[in-house]
Image (cartoon, helix red, strand yellow):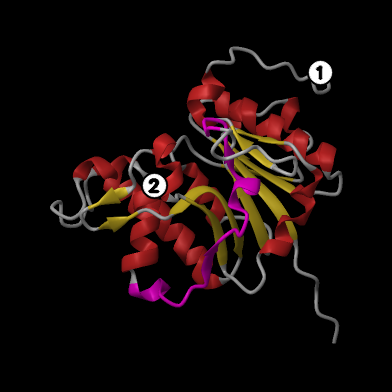
Amino acid sequence: MQVDELTKGYLIVASRDEIYYSWATKLLGDIKDFYPEAKVCLVTEERFLDSRADEADEILICDDNYRAKMWGMANTPWDITFYMDADMECMHEDISKVFDELDDNDMMFTGLPVDRWYIFGPTEFPGGTFTLCGAVCLYRKTPIVIEFMQDWYEYYNKQRDGSWWPDEKLYPKHLNVWDQFTLWWLTNKEEKYKDLKIEIFEDDLKWNYWSLLDRKKQPLKEDVVLLHLSCQASRKISEIKYDGLS
């Protein structure tokens, strides 16, 4: 009996603000330039759609939730998905090789090591330390992983509206703005996810190189695939032209 080959594709989410749609569609085009066979799903609000989305292989319509990214991740059309924040620039043809990084893991993220705290701020709090960065995620579309993504989205919404939060002595309330906290909670405190195989990319800066990094401390290597421009940097650009790559 023939076994169907797993589908592999990319997922980009743009909600709430048109600037994210502008960046998402530019990232979509950049991926296609380096890897024309790439399958890309764009998750966005219907009000933003225009001809810039024409290169998308799949389009999912989301609402204006601040973290629609987790909703999009839970609804991926692909068996294996590489999610990327919209405010990134694809810089290298190795974007086509990212799926080789998954091995037998369920999910893979980039990290938040101590030597990068100067841009993230300390990631410690009384109850623990953030170690996973949710800016990119390579994952399998299995029932338990999709349930994880759904919980990530639902817990985050509850922590933002105040309907869920653990012990404030261990988890200061100011952390409730971060989906990083929700990610930390699910991977460290939820029993049903204890057997998930979650790893950090071996060369994680290749897949998520923050533009704010000190290039003397963390050099920008020639094979860096994704440059993360951060929303602050991206908002400084008032206009992006889309006639070709100009």
Foreground of the two, 55 or 210: 210
Say left or right for 81 vs 235: right
Q: Position of residue 131 (x, y in %)?
A: 42, 55
Badge 1 or badge 2: first in the primary sequence: 2
Above or below residue 104? Residue 123 is: above
Residue nearest the viewer, comparing 191 with 230 = 230
Quadrant of residue 86 within the rendered picture: top right
Q: Mark number for residue 129?
A: none
Q: Nearer the viewer, residue 129 or 147?
A: 129
Q: Which residues are magenta?
A: 191-214
Residue 171 is situated, as x and y percent measured from the top left of the image, at: 21, 52
Element at label 1: loop
Above or below — where is 196 with respect to 148? below
Image quarter where the C terminus lies is top right
Q: Is residue 187 visible?
A: yes
Look at label 1 and name its amino acid.
Asp
Q: In the image, is residue 200 above or below residue 112?
A: below
Is 207 a magenta residue? yes
Residue 206 x/y as whole percent = 65, 47
Residue 39: tell me if it is visible: no
Q: Which residue is at a point 37% across and 53% down the rendered structure image?
A: 130
Distance between mark 1 and mark 2 Cα atoms? 35 Å
Pointer 1 residue:
243
